[in-house]
Amino acid sequence: MLAFITGATAGFGKATAELFASKGWSLIITGRRKVRLDVLEKNLRERYGINVKSLPFDVTQPAQVKAAVDSLQGEWKNIDLLVNNAGLAVGLNSIQEGNLDDWERMIDTNIKGLLYMTRSIAPLMIARGQGHIINIGSVAGKEVYANGNVYCATKHAVDALSRAMRIDMVKHGIKVTQVAPGLAETEFSIVRFKGDEERAKSVYKGLQPLTAEDIAETVFWAASRPPHVNILDIVLTPAAQANSTTVVRQ
């Protein structure tokens, strides 16, 4: 089995790569940070003895996406699973004070990146009449919260695209799943707050958040169901979180 995982250099993507490697899957891992990607490839190969190919590129650049996928040869084209994980939040401002560069980064990565990857990989799956696409969404794609405007909009797009994609893919025998996490402590908040680690830590203060490993286990569970079973949508939060704005802190 071969999985193609975007955004594999940190967080959910890295944990997912490690878990699938431990289960004996071959992997194609991608990310913008080549040094991190090379280290991960080496570690996965040495620890688990699996076949790993790393492709450093930016999912927001359609020419780079196409070139990377076109470079695949032989068995590397037989992708069983695409995990559209690459995504981010940047800033936390009201709509009238929004930073246009932040908006562009979120739209380009969370929506366009997912589309570019799916457009490149789906035809390979269709040609084989099998495959599974798992999109990493968010509880922010199920509801909205103050100052989350554009980020919430991008994750609502992931939710809608997952449902629409499923309709397009079902006749080709391809499964589509969305995994939508709540509060999970990774580099997410550090990126959102542009390196302000203290502010990032405050997001998770007083509660036990989800971990990247929790999300990886959820992705693997969805991917390892029998061929006749498709998990459409999984929303998971810490036990202390009821929705985007209701959180119990100790």
Image: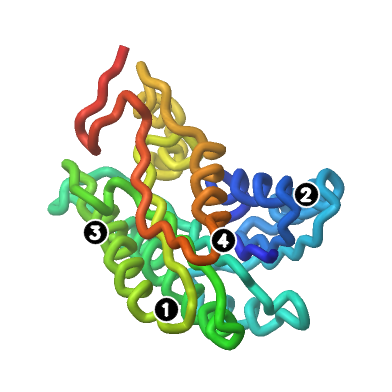
The residue to which callout 1 is attached is 169
The residue to which callout 2 is attached is 44
205 and 122: which one is in front? 122
**Earlier-in-chain disc, 1 versus 2:** 2
**Earlier-in-chain disc, 4 versus 2:** 4
**Earlier-in-chain disc, 4 versus 3:** 4
The vertical placement of 131 against 88, above or below, is below
Q: Amino acid at mark 3?
A: Ala
Q: Amino acid at mark 2?
A: Leu
**Earlier-in-chain disc, 3 versus 2:** 2
Question: What secondary structure is marked by label 2?
Answer: helix
Tell me the CA gap for discs 3 and 1.
24 Å
Tell me the CA gap for discs 4 and 3.
21 Å
**What number is the disc on residue 6?**
4
Q: Amino acid at mark 1?
A: Met
Is residue 160 visible from the viewing direction of this image?
Answer: yes
Q: In the displayed structure, does residue 203 sit left or right of residue 172?
A: left
Residue at x-position 34% and y-position 45%: 235
In the rendering, at what x and y percent does residue 52 appear? 77, 61
**Earlier-in-chain disc, 4 versus 1:** 4
Q: Nearer the viewer, mark 1 or mark 2?
A: 1
Question: What secondary structure is marked by label 1?
Answer: helix
The vertical placement of 181 against 83, above or below, is above
Residue at x-position 75% and y-position 82%: 73
**What number is the disc on residue 18?**
none
Tell me the CA gap for discs 4 and 2.
16 Å
Q: Nearer the viewer, mark 4 or mark 1?
A: 1
Q: In the displayed structure, does residue 190 sit left or right of residue 37?
A: left
The residue to which callout 3 is attached is 153
